[in-house]
Amino acid sequence: MFDIFKSIKKDNYETSEPVTLISKRMRIEANLLSGTGIVRIEGEYYGEVYVDGELILEKSGYINGNINVKIAYISGSIEGNVKCADLLHITSTGKITGDIECEAVLMDEGAVFIGYSKMTEKIDPDPLGLDE
């Protein structure tokens, strides 16, 4: 399924997956960000995030809203609940204020998590039926 011990540095990589980028100094307020592929946030996002794929929240990134993804790499700050179908990785600079629900959690030394956690077998990463 996935290897939590592999290198997960996401700075320079090639992928055939669609990538959505919210860059530094960008602030987006929306009801919902949804789709498939990879979402990389370096700026600020206010709203819900439902992605059938990966979320990469950079150190400069901030999300205020609930998240539902397959895999999340968190180096920035989140104020909201996080659901991951597979892996949630909170790096040493990452901070989550809210509840988490996922199959596996990896927290680096220095990571901050304030909330409740629930380990699950699988969570539907596509609650809106976008893949149908």
Image: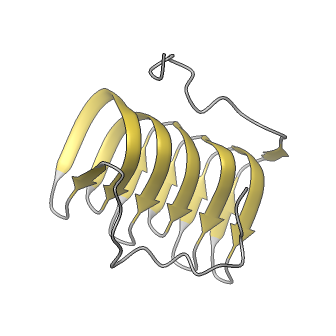
Q: Which corner quadrant of the image does residue 114 belong to?
A: bottom right
Q: Nearer the viewer, residue 19 or 56?
A: 19
In this view, 128 is above or below 91: above
Residue pictured at 49% horizontal, 45% vertical: 53
In this view, 1 is above or below 128: below
In this view, 130 is above or below 78: above
Horizontal and vertical percent for residue 5? 71, 78
Q: Is residue 128 left or right of residue 16?
A: right
Residue pictured at 30% horizontal, 48% vertical: 18
Q: Which corner quadrant of the image does residue 89 belong to?
A: bottom right
Residue pictured at 19% horizontal, 49% vertical: 27
Horizontal and vertical percent for residue 103? 78, 49
Q: Is residue 86 left or right of residue 118?
A: left
Q: Is residue 25 left or right of residue 37?
A: left
Q: Is residue 100 left or right of residue 44?
A: right
Residue pictured at 21% horizontal, 42% vertical: 28
The residue positioned farthest toward the left in the image shown? 25
